[in-house]
């Protein structure tokens, strides 16, 4: 008879995601994971597979949460420009997490040159975010908020690059004015 799980799978996945976000992939041992997640090693293997499989699931979990937050920002914004601003501000709103940063960005820097599966996952995550921005730009052009002469595909790439850059900068500075200035300058290209 199969044994009943004595833990919530989503809850322990969230714990693993937090640990990977804080320590990175390479510095996180299997023992660190089982201790932080509060499960046995066998349970980790049975539920998530090996450390690498767990990491890929953690990346996906993190990305899904980011997209949910973006969707909330978009729905709560009255204009396309406001929605884009809200998305950019998400990158700098991580109070007291300067040293932690974003799991996606941290993983891109740490692993994409050496791990094809992670590189593909990061590229998928980046593409989803660019698509959200592209759709907002299209909405803005259709409403007349953003001039038609703009190439929205190139703009979505540029704004996404600013979003990624902001997610890196929050790890190195507490200067909110500097970060807000970057957002303002980024959005100024939409005029």
Image (cartoon, rainbow, N blue to C red):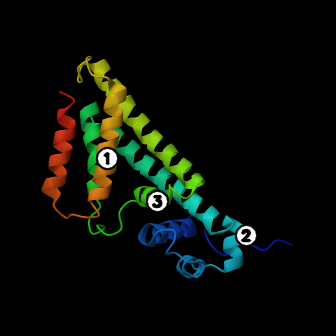
Q: Give the residue drawn at x 25%, y 41%.
A: 85
Determine whether 106 is above or below 32 in the image.
Answer: above
State left or right for residue 152 relative to residue 110. left
The answer for how far apart the CA atoms under marks 3 and 1 are is 16 Å
Query: Which is closer to the viewer, label 3 or label 1?
Result: 3
- Tell me, yes or no, whether the two marked residues, 3 and 1, touch with CB atoms within 8 Å: no
Which-is-in-front pick, marks 3 and 2?
3
Where in the figure is residue 134, as x and y percent of width and height? 38, 31
Q: Bin the neighbour count of mark 2 within 10 Å (Cα to Cα): few under 14, some 14-19, many 20 and up.
A: few
Q: Are marks 1 and 2 in contact (CB under 8 Å)?
A: no
Q: Secondary structure at mark 2?
A: helix
The circle drawn on residue 107 is 3
| Residue 87 visible in the shown view | no
Vertical placement of 105 versus 190: above or below?
below
Mark 1 or mark 2: whose residue is earlier in sequence = 2
Q: Secondary structure at mark 1?
A: helix
Which corner quadrant holds the C terminus? Answer: top left
Q: Position of residue 108 (x, y in %)?
A: 45, 55
Can residue 131 be seen from the camera position used here?
yes
Q: Label 2 belongs to which residue?
A: 46
**What numbered label is drawn on residue 163?**
1
The quarter of the displayed image where residue 178 is located = bottom left
Residue 34 in the image, given as x and y percentages of width and height: 59, 79
Residue for point 29% across, 61% down:
94
Residue 54: quarter of image: bottom right
Tag shown at residue 146: none
């Amino acid at each position: 008879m199969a044994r009943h799980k004595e833990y919530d799978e989503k809850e322990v996945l969230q714990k693993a995601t937090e640990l990977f976000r804080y320590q990175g992939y390479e510095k996180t041992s299997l023992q660190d994971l089982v201790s932080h997640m509060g499960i046995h090693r066998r349970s980790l293997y049975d539920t998530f597979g090996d450390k690498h499989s767990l990491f890929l699931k953690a990346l996906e979990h993190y990305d899904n949460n980011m997209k949910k937050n973006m969707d909330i920002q978009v729905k709560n914004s009255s204009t396309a420009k406001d929605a884009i601003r809200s998305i950019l501000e998400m990158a700098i709103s991580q109070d007291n997490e300067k040293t932690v940063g974003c799991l996606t960005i941290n993983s891109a820097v740490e692993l994409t040159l050496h791990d094809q599966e992670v590189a593909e996952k990061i590229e998928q995550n980046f593409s989803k975010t660019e698509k959200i921005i592209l759709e907002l730009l299209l909405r803005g052009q259709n409403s007349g908020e953003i001039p038609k002469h703009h190439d929205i595909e190139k703009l979505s790439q540029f704004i996404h690059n600013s979003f990624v850059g902001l997610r890196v900068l929050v790890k190195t500075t507490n200067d909110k004015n500097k970060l807000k200035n970057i957002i303002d300058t980024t959005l100024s290209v939409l005029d």
